[in-house]
Amino acid sequence: MTTLFNSSQEIVFVLHGLTFTQTNGHIYFVFILLLYLFTIFINLTLVFAIALEKMLHDPMYLFLCNLCFNGIIGASSFYPKILYDILFDSHVITYIGCLTQVFVIYSYIYCECTNLTVMAYDRYVAICKPLHYHSIMTTNNMWTLIFLTWLFSWLECGIGMGLLVRLPLCNINIDKLYCSNWAVVKLSCIDTTLNNIYGFIQIFFHVSQFTFIVISYLNIIRACLHSRAHRSKFTQTCLPHLIILTNFLISLLFDVMYARYGSNTSLLALRNIMAVEFLVVPPLVNPIIYGMNLSQIRNRVGQMFNRKVAV
């Protein structure tokens, strides 16, 4: 007999996928905690390095600052909950807690996609239309793009959440380390066609963003073939962006494909890696890639820590 759970009740979901013994649980906890703290540290370092240095208040650096800030949000949507689960051997999450985690995770995803698109447009204008760059990327336009990045992300996520909370649930078992939209939708007792349609609209929108990025970089590469200065600028600013974009898209694709078409009988370790890669890897590598490659940021970070050591 199927049990109908009303969202007004205190539903508690059971999360599956976290298996460990008491001995290796402490090892996992320490390792994940250190990874989380390091992720927060390097992202905050770049955020403060850019925010406190007026010479780095160009659009490219502030878009990067926005990317790192969003990375902190993405990491914080996952790490604290799994650390709590490991420490207290807990495998449950409340209905409100689950919806909150879904909202934060998907806000991070949508903001990441849109911010990477904005960064591609910024590089396109800088390399393909250098004489018009400062007239196009004005301070007002830059802050408008950052504001719209967050606004569209929250609106997109808010609509998805509205479609999610209307669903009555017939199950409380989530076959994942954390709550995701599709994992909760699959627990519904009623037809989810509306959720599927909205999902395909989102896919079309973000594929359009990716297409725009590809077209931008094809034009950038074509411009770089005729200029040594453009090739240098491409290597320093565009190559890190391409690496970050590729890493994020592959990580996200893994999770989407597994969520919709993955088998519950597949290897647990592989499933877990595929499920958390886009929450762990991009926030960790984004500031490292840019911090190592952009000399202005590298020098500013060096000055920050040298000043602390001197004090």
Image: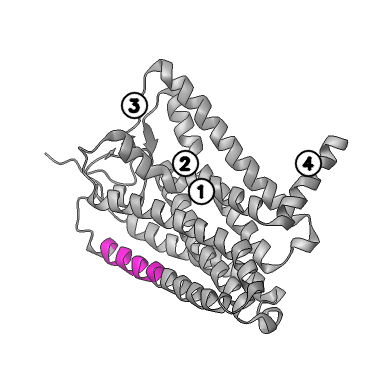
- Majority SS type along the magenta span: helix
Can I make out residue 131 in this image?
Answer: yes
Q: Which of the two residues, 127 or 190, is positioned nearer the viewer here?
A: 127
Q: Secondary structure at mark 4?
A: helix
For badge 4, the amino acid type reads Phe
For badge 3, the amino acid type reads Thr
Mark sitting earlier along the chain (3/2): 3
Q: Which residue is mark 4?
A: 305
Q: Residue at x 65, y 51 (%)?
A: 291
Q: Secondary structure at mark 2?
A: loop
Q: CA distance from mark 1 to mark 2?
A: 7 Å
For badge 1, the amino acid type reads Gly
Q: Residue at x 49, y 37 (%)?
A: 79
Residue 281 vs 214, above or below: the answer is: above
Whether the residues at callouts 2 and 4 have beta carbons within 8 Å, the answer is no
* Residue 30, x across and y down, in percent: 52, 25
Whether the residues at callouts 1 and 4 have beta carbons within 8 Å, the answer is no
Mark 3, Cα crowd under 10 Å, few <14 / some 14-19 / many 20+, is few
Whether the residues at callouts 4 and 3 have beta carbons within 8 Å, the answer is no
Which of pointers 1 and 4 indicates the residue nearer the eye?
4
Residue 308 occupies quadrant = top right
Which of pointers 4 and 3 indicates the residue nearer the eye?
4
Whether the residues at callouts 1 and 2 have beta carbons within 8 Å, the answer is yes
Q: Which residue is mark 3?
A: 19
Q: Secondary structure at mark 3?
A: loop
